[in-house]
Image: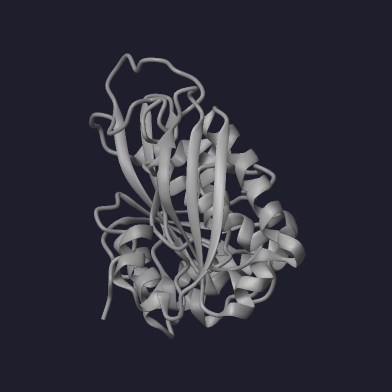
């Protein structure tokens, strides 16, 4: 298997191809990553109930008939307060460069806060085809849902509006067909069995970081970063992965480790199990927690996790 995440089925395209870029944007916790996973048909982006889980641009690769959809999952757009936040927001807007379709994903079960309407305003004058995707409709109040659609369409010239639930799958097939129908003719950019542009090394760090979000509380996941220091294939075909979890303070290190190391063992066990499934081979995962005050001001950390340094 190559150093990228793959589809589970193989077949060769046999006619004229279509291929295009769909930039998936929105406020934090709108369900963008869950939507990309649903469109691809398997997990390519990590998800958690916490906002701002996605930190860097990631592309999921989906296929609909003879069309390959390049789905750019971007960090949630919010008002940045530190350099790391600014880098994430820059990555989100950078993910829209060259897009054929801009897909604004909105959490339909809530109101329309300023952070959503501000993003809509930013899209208003852009020339790309724009789709509005109201997500989490299974949890939404139906009259409010229609009001959201009406208000946002009055602000932006959306070509179409879709009501979906990325979690249940409602409306996903229709959305996928509609996206595929408007993408330009051209060769596929990736083999049919590839579902992401992420390397296995990068995906390994993301899987461990997902466990930090799922198992740790409050702000601690936001004060940490995971670096894959070594990713090697053993002679028996298994993967040996060494990762470093950087935190800002000794008290945070103690929380990640847990009493007697119980928490870090649980984080490692769950990440290892998921990676073994994702990589389709046994995984030996070694985690180390290091205190590094000001890691979010280290250019090397930005480079390692795929963010640009911003001033």
Farthest bottom residue in view:
81
Instruction: Look at the image and name its color scheme.
Output: one colour
Residue ID at (24%, 53%)? 98
Q: The C terminus lies in which quarter of the figure?
A: bottom left
Residue ID at (59%, 56%)? 210
Count of numbered circles in the view:
0
Residue closer to the observer: 27 or 124: 27
Farthest front residue in view:
260
> Residue 162 appears at what percent x and percent y?
54, 52
Residue closer to the observer: 145 or 50: 50
> Residue 255 appears at what percent x and percent y?
68, 71
Q: Compared to 281, does 301 lie above or below?
A: below
> Residue 61 appears at what percent x and percent y?
41, 38
Q: Is residue 38 visible?
A: no
> Residue 231 appears at what percent x and percent y?
42, 42
Q: Compared to 238, does 116 lie above or below?
A: below
Q: Compared to 175, does 150 lie above or below?
A: below
Residue ID at (61%, 42%)? 272
Q: Is residue 128 visible?
A: yes
- Quadrant for residue 57, please give it: bottom left
Residue ID at (40%, 31%)? 194
Residue closer to the observer: 5 or 244: 244
Q: The N terminus lies in which quarter of the figure?
A: top left
């Amino acid at each position: 298997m190559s150093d990228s995440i793959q589809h589970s089925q193989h077949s060769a395209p046999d006619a004229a191809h279509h291929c295009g870029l769909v930039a998936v944007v929105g406020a934090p916790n709108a369900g963008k990553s869950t939507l990309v996973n649903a469109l691809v048909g398997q997990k390519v982006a990590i998800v958690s109930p916490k906002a701002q889980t996605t930190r860097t641009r990631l592309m999921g690769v989906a296929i609909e008939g003879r069309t390959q959809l390049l789905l750019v999952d971007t960090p949630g757009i919010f008002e940045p307060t530190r350099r790391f936040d600014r880098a994430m927001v820059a990555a989100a807007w950078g993910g829209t460069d060259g897009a054929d379709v801009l897909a604004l994903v909105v959490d339909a079960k809530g109101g329309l806060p300023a952070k959503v309407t501000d993003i809509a305003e930013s899209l208003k004058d852009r020339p790309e085809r724009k789709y509005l995707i109201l997500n989490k409709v299974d949890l939404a109040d139906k009259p409010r849902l229609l009001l959201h659609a009406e208000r946002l369409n009055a602000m932006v010239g959306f070509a179409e509006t879709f009501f979906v639930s990325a979690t249940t799958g409602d409306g996903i097939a229709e959305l996928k067909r509609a996206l595929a129908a408007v993408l330009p003719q051209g060769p596929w950019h990736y083999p049919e069995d590839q579902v992401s542009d992420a390397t296995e090394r990068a995906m390994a760090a993301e899987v461990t970081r997902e466990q930090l979000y799922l198992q740790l509380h409050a702000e601690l996941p936001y004060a940490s970063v995971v670096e894959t220091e070594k990713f090697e294939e053993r002679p028996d075909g298994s993967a040996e992965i060494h990762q470093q979890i950087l935190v800002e303070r000794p008290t945070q290190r103690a929380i990640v480790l847990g009493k007697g190391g119980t928490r870090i063992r649980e984080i490692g066990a769950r990440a290892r199990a998921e990676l073994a499934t994702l990589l389709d081979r046994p995984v030996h995962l070694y985690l180390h927690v290091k205190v590094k005050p000001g890691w979010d001001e280290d250019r090397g950390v930005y480079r390692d996790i795929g963010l640009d340094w911003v001033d």
